[in-house]
Image (cartoon, helix red, strand yellow):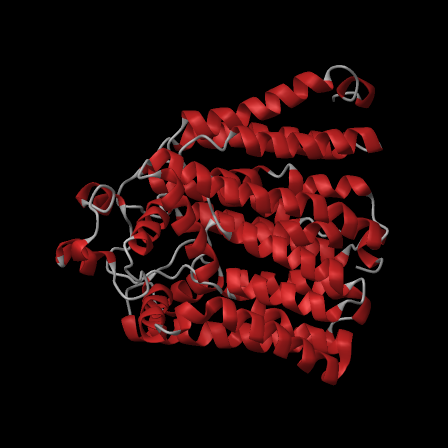
Amino acid sequence: MIHKATITGNWRLIVYALFAGLFLLINYGFERTQFVPLIAVYSCAFLLYIVIFKNWKSDQLVQEGKWLGIFIRFIILFSMPNLTDDFYRFIWDGHLMLNQINPYTYTPEMVSAQNYLGADTAVLNENLYQLLNSKPYFTIYPPLSQCMFAISAYLSGGHLLLNQIILKLFIFCFEVGSILLIPKILKQLKLNANLQLLYTLNPLVILELTGNLHFEAIMIFFMLIAIYLFYNNKNTLSAIAFGFAIGAKLWPIMLMPLLFKQLGFKKTITYSIIAGAVSIVTLFPMLLQYANIFSSLNLYFQQFEFNGSVFYLLKWLINKDENFETFTLMRQLLPLVTLVSISILSIKYNKDKFLFALQMAFSIYCLFATTMHPWYITPLIMLSVFTGFRYSILWSLLIYFTYVTYIDITYPENYLVVIIQYILVIGFLIFELLNQKPEMIAKN
């Protein structure tokens, strides 16, 4: 066992260097096909993360941990995302807009088939096209993200590495904003300042947001602003921030029913109207092409599946063989079950457990989803900072084992990994619910 006095003495500089070095190794040294070294280094980073969180209690050490998290995000800005290929679509969409081509109107297949619609082919060419995934689908990235795609494309001058560095810089700025907001909310709630390290130094958050360019970072930032303003009784400004969170990622809209118990009917309607108006304005270019976007989203929810929990269990129970009609019905019913479950939660939860209710609502969404990539749980990690429930922290370790899928180019899922992951996560959640600690009972 590492003695606390040792780990928090001068040796902490070695801990910082080692922790940062592990992220450099993952971001600059591995591809996602290299599962064994990837998961080995990630597990080491996670172990150090737990050591730091458990031992860094003083104000000085917490501040050092905060700046360590920001520093690590900065030094990985200059690596190409190595665990995803989504960013090629970001570059594609950005250059479409520079060429005055609406990315909501044309799929990559359409653009390629129509000889790039007269666009400058210095970047928009077959080389970039072949790197894209989901070529038959219309883009589903909201206008807030599209603006960043276009700015990055313009500033990079066609240089792909510089393009993604600029995109990462946007994510980095939102992440820094979140890191600075979290301690303010902790202070509002009279919770320990070192809890901020649960998010700031979480390896999954660092690697998937700044490291691999996932735009959950924007939504998390605006959610934190909304929460901070909400607890300062600035409901109008909170609603505006919440509207931007919906504009960044649509899923926060499902949290609206939880407000009724907090604000009452009239104030919740007002809050919802303001948030809805802001989100409609931010999503307006996307809404103009509703049919195209709906078709892509429908295909996504009807055809894509990865690391599902309840969905996979139902598939196994109902029919182990392919049964398209049954599975299609299941896909259609699960969002309804999610909505009903969150509605029940909005009625039953204790009024002084608002943030815990938000965490449970998003957990319900995750458990009934047909697709659950590692970066999808980053909002859960953020909420766990304030609630005292740590199952999402455990999940941030276990869900990384799903990268075993990418060893083979055909992407076969390892169902044993999926089963073990959900047994442990759900089991730990149940354990925490049955053995609530004092800080969990405190207002949150």
Q: Is residue 84 left or right of residue 430?
A: left
Residue 376 percent coordinates (x, y) = 51, 53
Q: Indicate the quadrant containing the C terminus: top left, top right, bottom left or bottom right.
A: bottom right
Residue 379 percent coordinates (x, y) = 60, 54
Q: Residue furthest toward the bottom?
A: 266
Report the label total: 0
Residue 350 percent coordinates (x, y) = 79, 70
Does residue 235 sit above or below 225 in this rendering?
A: below
Residue at 17 percent of width and 57 percent of height = 117
Q: Indicate the quadrant containing the N terminus: top left, top right, bottom left or bottom right.
A: top right
Query: In this rendering, does residue 82 appear at all?
Result: no
Picture quadrant of residue 219? bottom right
Residue at 37 percent of width and 30 percent of height = 34
Does residue 378 sit above or below 301 in this rendering?
A: above
Closer-to-camera residue (79/169): 169
Residue at 81 percent of width and 62 percent of height = 232
Query: In this rendering, does residue 396 appear at all?
Result: yes
Does residue 62 sit above or below 107 in this rendering?
A: above
Closer-to-camera residue (37/288): 288
Residue 402 percent coordinates (x, y) = 44, 44
Residue at 33 percent of width and 37 percent of height = 160
Does residue 56 sit above or below 435 in this rendering?
A: above
